[in-house]
Amino acid sequence: MSRESTRHTLQVALVLCLVCSFVVSLAAVSLRARQQRNANDARDRNVLYAAFPGELKNEADLPRFFETWGVHGLNQFFTQFVERRAVNLNSGDTVPGIDPLLYDQIVASRDPELSQQLDLQTDPRRDVAGIKRREDVGWVYLIRGKDEPEGKIQSVVLPIRGYGLWSTLKGFVAIDALSLSENPSTAVVRGLTYYSHRETPGLGGEVDNPAWKDKWPGRTIFDREWNVKLRVVKSPEASHDVDALTGATITSNGVSNMIEFWLGADGYGPFLKKMVAEGQAVEEPARGDDGG
């Protein structure tokens, strides 16, 4: 058979396709564990960005931050100072036995057996964040102070997500644990960060701008009845108001809506109430079986 025949050309192309497919599949499988580790590390870095907005503006600040805390890297910091706790979002109770490396609450929200559809017919405001389904179990990150590694909780970091203008924004909000321990109306934000969104650059995309994120620390969150008062508005007047993003009203409203949802009764509200009632915000935290 001539090497210049159509049949030979097709055979060579087929063999090349099969070899390339095998190489790509092998690389994907062999790198899967590394990709997951990288994703977990990126998540953990964003937890710290929310909890320590003054010290951590970006990844370049991490080496000095870890040196100050006397640890060698991200994993050691989480081992010594962070408790990952899985909680039932309906009751606020701790759920033991869930592996933080394997359980993804966003993936769980798509599984009817691990989540619930939000009832929009009887209560349209229930899905104010626009997520449609909410997982039954969510992660909480409890960060202890470096001078009391087995004592007081310094920050409570909560995952948040919700729809903006073009996309679902995913991030973390950190609450000052000491302020939360007094009563709901004294609770203040430590920081906020977003790690995933597709909002308009220069407008809604400014949720990533350090200058805007600097407006969040110290903002009050609740009233005395645990109603979420924290919001993003054009003309801030109260201690719970954050200045809106210029030219990005829909994204700003989306941020307000997801804060209202995830800190409210369908989000982490039951956990926060239980935490305060049991004195966990100021006492030594109970170590769960879910890792840390």
Image (tube, grey):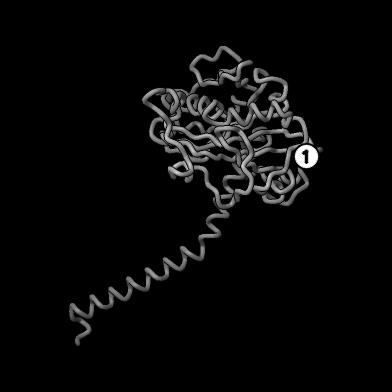
Q: Residue furthest top?
A: 237
Name the residue at 68% across, 30% down.
Answer: 275
Task: From the viewer's side, name the closer residue of 248 and 44.
Answer: 44
Name the residue at 51% across, 14% down.
Answer: 235
Task: From the viewer's side, name the closer residue of 152 and 24.
Answer: 152
Query: What amino acid does circle 1 point to?
Result: Lys
Relative to 108, residue 276 above or below: above
Give the side of residue 277 with respect to residue 242, left or right: right
Question: Picture quarter containing residue 50?
Answer: top right
Give the side of residue 187 with respect to residue 80, left or right: left
Task: From the viewer's side, name the closer residue of 222 and 286.
Answer: 286
Name the residue at 54% across, 50% down.
Answer: 39
Q: Which residue, given by chain and number where applicable, does mark 1 sit on? A: 146
The image position of residue 256, as x and y in percent, is: 50, 24
Name the residue at 78% across, 46% down.
Answer: 70
The image position of residue 229, as x and y in percent, is: 56, 18
Give the side of residue 256 with respect to residue 275, left or right: left
Relative to 241, residue 157 above or below: below
Question: Picture quarter containing residue 89?
Answer: top right
The image position of residue 134, as x and y in percent, is: 47, 36
Within 10 Å of the Cα at label 1, are there few (<14), some (14-19), or many (20+) other Cα atoms? Answer: some
